[in-house]
C-alpha cells in the first residue's frame, strides 16, 4: 500500500534522514523487522496458535527460543532471530534453512551481464553497492546458467505458417576483450494466424549482410516454418534474393518506416516538419 506524503515527511522527521545512506539504513531495519514478524507468523501457523494464546489447544509442541542467523539482502547485511519449536517440526518457507543470501543475487548478476558489463565490472559493482564479495569466476558460472535456456529458445519449433514476418537489424555497441565493437542483432518477428506477435529469432552477428539473413531464413525453415505470406524488410542488397531462395512463394514488401527515412534524407531540414506531417 502506497505511503502518503504526510507519512513520508513524518518518517523523515522522526528518523532524522539526511542522506541516501540513512534511507538505506532505515529500509534495512524495516525490512528486518518485517521478516522477523513474518517468520513468527509462520511458526504460529505451524503450532496452530499465537504466542501466549494456546488456550485449550492440546499439543505437546511449543516455542523453544530463537537461533541467530546472518543474512545478506539488497539493503545490506543484518541478523534475524529464527524462531524454533521444541519438536523441530518448524521448516521456514520464507527463508529456508541454510539460505543466507536473500538478495536475489543471481538475478542481479544476469541483469548486469545483459547490460554488457564484464564479469570483473559486475564483481566490482556488487561489492560497491551491496558489500557482496563475488569472484569473477563465480559471476561467469552464474551467467553460464542462462546459456542452455537461450539455446533452447533459439531452437524451439515454430508454427508452419506465418501471415506476416518482419525482419530487421538492431545495431549496438558491446565490450569484448576490453574493446568496444559494433554488433548487429538480427531480429525476426512473426505475426501468427491468430494475430499475435511472436519473436521467432534473435541472433547476433558482426554486421548486417544478406548472407547472414539467408542463414537465419534457413534456420526458420528447419524449425518448422513452411510458408510465409508477406515479408516486411528494408532495402538491404541481396535481401530479396535471400528470401526467395528459402520461401519462393512469399510476397516481399519494403518497410514503410525505412522508405520514409530514406525519403527524409533528400528533404531540407527547414521543410522536414511539413514534409513529415503529410504522412
Image (tube, rainbow, N blue to C red):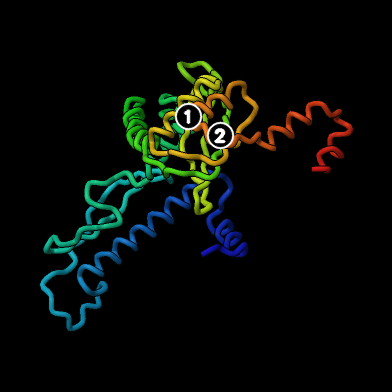
Expressed as whole percent of the image width and height from the top left, the position of residue 23 reads 52, 49
| Disc 1 element | helix
Nearest the viewer among 154 and 118 is: 154
Judge whether 44 appears above or below 231 on screen: below
Label 2 or label 1, whichever comes before in sequence order = 2
State the residue position of label 1: 246
Judge whether 194 appears above or below 153 on screen: below
Binning the other alpha carbons within 10 Å of mark 1 as few (below 14), some (14 to 19) or many (20 upward) gives: some
Please give the name of the residue rendered at 46% of the width and 31% of the height, measured from the top-left corner.
Answer: 125
Viewport quadrant of the C terminus = top right
Res 218 quadrant in image: top left
Please give the name of the residue rendered at 60% of the width and 36% of the height, measured from the top-left corner.
Answer: 232
The extreme bottom residue here reads 56
Res 225 quadrant in image: top left
Expressed as whole percent of the image width and height from the top left, the position of residue 19 reads 57, 45
Please give the name of the residue rendered at 37% of the width and 39% of the height, measured from the top-left corner.
Answer: 156
Please give the name of the residue rendered at 32% of the width and 44% of the height, measured from the top-left corner.
Answer: 101
Query: Mark 2 and mark 1: span between their CA atoms?
Result: 14 Å
Expressed as whole percent of the image width and height from the top left, the position of residue 206 reads 51, 19
State the residue position of label 2: 167
Q: Is residue 117 left or right of 140 when viewed as pictured? A: right
Nearest the viewer among 162 and 248 is: 248
Amino acid at each position: 500500500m502506497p505511503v502518503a506524503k504526510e507519512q513520508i515527511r513524518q518518517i523523515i522527521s522522526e528518523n532524522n534522514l539526511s542522506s541516501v545512506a540513512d534511507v538505506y539504513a532505515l529500509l534495512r531495519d524495516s525490512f528486518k523487522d518485517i521478516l522477523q514478524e513474518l517468520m513468527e507468523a509462520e511458526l504460529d501457523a505451524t503450532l496452530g496458535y499465537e504466542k501466549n494464546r494456546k488456550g485449550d489447544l492440546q499439543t505437546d509442541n511449543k516455542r523453544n527460543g530463537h537461533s541467530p542467523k546472518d543474512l545478506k539482502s539488497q539493503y545490506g547485511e543484518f541478523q534475524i532471530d529464527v524462531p524454533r519449536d521444541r519438536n523441530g517440526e518448524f521448516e521456514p518457507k520464507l527463508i529456508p534453512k541454510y539460505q543466507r543470501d536473500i538478495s536475489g543475487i543471481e538475478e542481479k548478476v544476469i541483469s548486469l551481464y545483459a547490460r554488457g558489463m564484464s564479469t570483473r565490472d559486475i564483481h566490482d559493482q556488487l561489492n560497491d553497492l551491496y558489500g557482496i564479495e563475488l569472484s569473477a569466476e563465480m559471476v561467469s558460472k552464474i551467467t553460464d546458467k542462462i546459456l542452455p535456456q537461450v539455446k533452447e529458445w533459439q531452437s524451439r519449433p515454430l508454427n508452419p505458417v506465418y501471415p506476416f514476418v518482419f525482419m530487421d537489424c538492431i545495431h549496438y555497441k558491446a565490450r569484448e576483450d576490453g574493446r568496444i565493437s559494433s554488433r548487429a542483432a538480427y531480429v525476426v518477428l512473426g505475426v501468427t494466424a491468430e494475430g499475435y506477435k511472436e519473436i521467432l529469432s534473435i541472433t547476433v552477428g558482426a554486421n548486417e549482410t544478406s548472407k547472414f539473413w539467408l542463414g537465419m531464413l534457413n534456420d526458420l525453415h528447419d524449425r518448422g516454418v513452411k510458408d510465409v505470406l508477406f515479408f516486411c524488410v528494408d532495402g538491404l542488397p541481396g535481401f530479396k534474393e535471400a528470401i526467395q531462395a528459402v520461401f519462393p512463394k512469399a510476397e516481399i514488401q519494403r518497410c514503410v518506416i525505412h522508405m520514409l527515412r530514406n525519403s527524409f534524407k533528400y528533404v531540407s531540414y527547414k521543410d522536414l516538419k511539413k514534409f513529415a506531417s503529410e504522412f
